[in-house]
Image (cartoon, coloured by chain):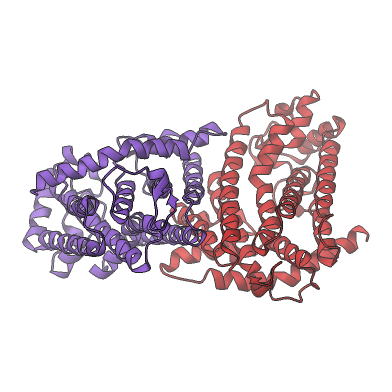
Chain colours: A purple, B red
Amino acid sequence: MNQNTREDAVLSAIEERRELVNDAIDDELPMAEPERLYEASRYLLEAGGKRLRPTVSLLVAEALADVDLLSADYGEFPALDDSTVDVMAAAVSIEVIQSFTLIHDDIMDDDDLRRGVPAVHREYDTETAILAGDTLYSKAFEIMLRTEADPEASLDAIDLLARTCTRICEGQALDVDFETRADVDADEYLDMVERKTAVLYGAAASVPAIVMGADDDVVDALYRYGVNAGQAFQIQDDVLDLTVPSEQLGKQRGSDLVENKQTVITVHARDHGVDVDSLVDADDPENVTDAEIDAAVAALEDAGSIAYARNLAEDLTAQAKAELDGLPDNDARDLLREIADYLIERGY
Amino acid sequence: MNQNTREDAVLSAIEERRELVNDAIDDELPMAEPERLYEASRYLLEAGGKRLRPTVSLLVAEALADVDLLSADYGEFPALDDSTVDVMAAAVSIEVIQSFTLIHDDIMDDDDLRRGVPAVHREYDTETAILAGDTLYSKAFEIMLRTEADPEASLDAIDLLARTCTRICEGQALDVDFETRADVDADEYLDMVERKTAVLYGAAASVPAIVMGADDDVVDALYRYGVNAGQAFQIQDDVLDLTVPSEQLGKQRGSDLVENKQTVITVHARDHGVDVDSLVDADDPENVTDAEIDAAVAALEDAGSIAYARNLAEDLTAQAKAELDGLPDNDARDLLREIADYLIERGY
């Protein structure tokens, strides 16, 4: 398939599952007292989102069970023995964790907007946003307990969820720490990205295998699929921040440079003699000019740093796709490969 | 036993277990990278604390197993079948949740001090404190998975932990909400206290029973023991805020009144014709005079509100103690009864 056809296939797969995921979120996270807390907890989930991670979870389930796409009920899905499990609960749990991390990240980064609406701490207040995130955190565990998997498998799923959350916190702490360090190397950067972003893709891809009773080597391969694809996704994000016009990006192009964010691009450039800290004078994305960003991007291109990042993202994507070789050969596996490509080919 | 002897017995029981609990916290929550995050996560736990909740957990285990006090290894504790379980892991998990909630509460309430040291968000910064709390949150689940209980029992323990965290968030949200409401009634107040404070005592008391394989009715009775004792504890806290001199309290006496905090005392007073909102003019604990607080306390005493609170705390304590009737008659059960008394008899 060419890129456009592939992107269409991915977008359809997401689109076809989004409504089901949204209904399941409604069911698993009903309104309750106190209302304001539950409204704030649901606010970001209701504001939209592609539901990429749940889509990965549901496709993994379909690939493993080797069923036709959308032919089986995700709530009573055929496991690899004779039982059925609620793979949708696992998928929703992952999305709820994603939402909790976004709410707390927006407080920490003091970001005003998310998914085109005010961040939770702006729409409500910081206290409510901290509590809304904390509520989603425990709800994600409550929901993960509802897969009706074999007890040992359920415990493995809970264990993965808990360790994933710990790693996300570590990754966020490293990311903040890197803003004040000029000596971050590529391995450190990739480790940070693995923890902050990629492990949740790893969990999204491997949790359905765990609750369906797949062998450890299958679970591990799916985890590596998610982690590699997730790292590639983040590196592509770093490239897009420099190369996509601000209007399309929805924020100032080059804002990572302005805010001294370490990316694999700045790490490479610094290693190749570029004075990264002097590339942009402005220290506020609102005061930077397009000319200044253009000059900075040209310097990064001359150093080969942007090409390096693109190559790295492509390598990681190829590794991700190769991890799927052990799955049954079916449409769901094809879509999982295409999603990995989509993550680094999307324009913004 | 008279009150002093009883208090000595309770303090000894706590003291004798504190070092073991602290060693277990060290083992279950080792330093890791990034160092600053783990330092911040451990900071409040290392600052002290009586370890009241873990002590309750360990005594429940000893009462149920009907062993001599401190005679069995908490890490390989005799369960009610032929297996052993790590009840210390369950106890530590509860204390780690307590620590997470304190860190986030201090951010929300903008409190500067905790356990005589700067709050985590003052010693570090708000971002780090949010992340430190989030890290402890997932660590508590990781630790609760290490009890080596029967898988079904482990899942029940995780389920209780998750639901307890959700309820704590709800309770904190209600508490904040009540500060702007003048029509809170006693039932609403007790419901808030149950969620915010008491359910964690309920979890501390019932989780060892779950992982040791006790019957549901025993688990439920222990949960109610913890919840009733925890509610009484909070009501006593409200009484102490009005009746203990500032020096002993470690903060301004009457600060709840100044800050418009709803307590069972103000709820009762309002119901009995006291104009609670006019009791104290100052709206900052630093600007209130002792004379103003004395007059307010006299008005609350005249309305019978402080006596009402004391009676309510005593009733709840009696209910808590009665829930222990089904346990084997042993020293550990006696100590659990004495802890319930201690919670409302402590001077500050």
> Relative to the observer, which residue lies in front, A231 or B61?
B61
Residue A298 x/y as whole percent: 7, 55
Residue A249 x/y as whole percent: 19, 41
Judge whether residue B108 can be spotted in this image. Answer: yes
Residue A288 x/y as whole percent: 18, 45
Residue A68 x/y as whole percent: 26, 46
Q: Is residue A82 left or right of residue B113?
A: left
Q: Is residue B342 left or right of residue B53?
A: right
Total marks placed: 0
Above or below residue B148? Residue A330 is above
State which quarter of the image contains the N terminus of chain B.
bottom right
| Residue farthest top in this picture | B273
Judge whether residue A125 can be spotted in this image. Answer: no
Q: Quadrant of residue B108?
A: top right
> Relative to the observer, which residue lies in front, B324 or A97?
B324
Q: Is residue A112 left or right of residue A277?
A: right
> Relative to the observer, which residue lies in front, A170 or A213?
A213
Above or below residue A120? Residue B218 is below
Q: Is residue A202 left or right of residue A307?
A: right
Above or below residue B278? Residue A179 is below
Q: Quadrant of residue A299?
A: bottom left
Q: Quadrant of residue A51?
A: top left
| Residue farthest right in this picture | B2
Residue found 81% across the figure and 36% down from its top = B297
Above or below residue A241? Residue B132 is below
